[in-house]
Amino acid sequence: MLKLIKSKLPLGQAAVVLILLVLTPFAVAQPQVLRLLVWEGYAPEAQRLEFQRYIKGKYDVDLKLAVSYIDETEDCFQALRLKTADVLSPAHNRINDTRFRMFDLGLVLPVNLANIPNYQDLAERFQQLKHLNHHGQIYGVPFAWGPYGLIYNADKVAKPPTSWNALWEPRYRNQFTIADLGEHNVYITALALGHGEEDLKSFDALNNARFRNKLRQLVRNNHRLWLGVDTAKDLEGMALATSWGFSLPELKARGQNWKWAPLKEKSPGWIDNYILSHSLKDRPQLKRIAEEWINFAISPEFQARVLVEGLSARPVNRLTRGLLSAEQIENVGLAESERAAENHFVLMPELDRRTRNGFDLLWRQAKGIKKRMQQEAL
């Protein structure tokens, strides 16, 4: 290459070309891409743009956030295994799942809390969570929490339902929608039957004719199954629905009056977390930027705007409350004491392989019966 330049260009021009060839790879900064795999609604465009501007100003990095959405609870493990995501938001009961062995296989990196100063403002119950602590190191940060609960359309339902058993009442047949999440629906069926918390992690306790019939009836009575997160479109025309709460703000914007049902039984509870993939292991700058995203996402401003206002989910940052209206505080349950809130939820348990496979089987069988009924009706 050098001989070709010297033979066809004057010396001065050849020198300029040579300098450009040497310096160009270093002078033109390549944009960094941070890949997020999160539940829909966790990384809105406005916040992504704000974060990109922040990273540009602090690190002089042109950052692109590539966002994908979780549809099924196992999506995070597949993304870790295949290195298709850098930052992920799995629920608490998936991180220590014995099937995945995320820590033992080195699929998750520990976080540096020195790079996440907003961690100190988390409510005390969300610091040093057991499912994020492995051999004394912290492997993630909680981001949001709430119930897989029951909501009702107050324009269609005069009296608020007070039990999960409302989903089995004949008057609501074909008037409700639930998630296509077998494990979660196993839990609400068990709670409706009066099972205690220990039974929620026992296939043997639930594998009986009474339970199977109850679960099958739930599926038969259901109008439709929603996927991933509940949306206003999923709930259109319904009287009742299971929900993360994510559809409530849009339903309100559409003029629909949906509310949480005050159940006498507990609701299955979840904590979503941010973890870092081993895809960042040899990329220190991008890992630092990933920790910046976590810090940004647990800031009180982000939590107020995105979680409470946008998704009606519960924040983990205790300072968020000061940015909310009295109505918002009431709507997401922050008006309750921490002890009262705990009395309303039972955290979804970590399951062993046999139990999870058993629950999956119960759900597939229940769905199969409805499918056969639909085919016979054609």
Image (spheres, rainbow, N blue to C red):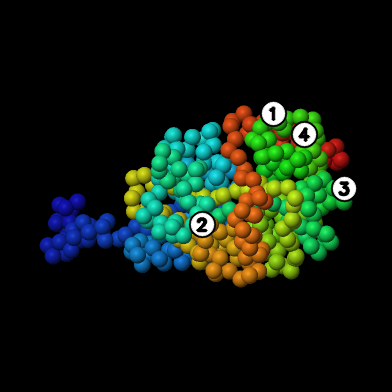
Q: Position of residue 162 (x, y in %)?
A: 78, 53
Which residue is under mark 1?
204
Seen in the picture, residue 334 relative to 100 is either above or below; the reply is below
Seen in the picture, residue 368 relative to 336 is either above or below; the reply is above
- The crowd level at tag 4 (other Cα within 10 Å; few <14, some 14-19, many 20+) is some
- Numbered disc in front, either 1 or 2: 2
Assess whether mark 4 and mark 1 are in contact (beta carbons under 8 angstroms): no
The CA distance from mark 1 to mark 4 is 12 Å
Q: Which amino acid type is shown beneath numbered disc 2?
A: Ala
| Among numbered discs 4 and 3, the one appearing first in the sequence | 3
Which residue is under mark 3?
170
The CA distance from mark 2 to mark 4 is 39 Å
The CA distance from mark 3 to mark 1 is 29 Å
Q: Which amino acid type is shown beneath numbered disc 4?
A: Arg
> In terms of secondary structure, where does tag 2 sit?
loop
Assess whether mark 1 and mark 3 are in contact (beta carbons under 8 angstroms): no
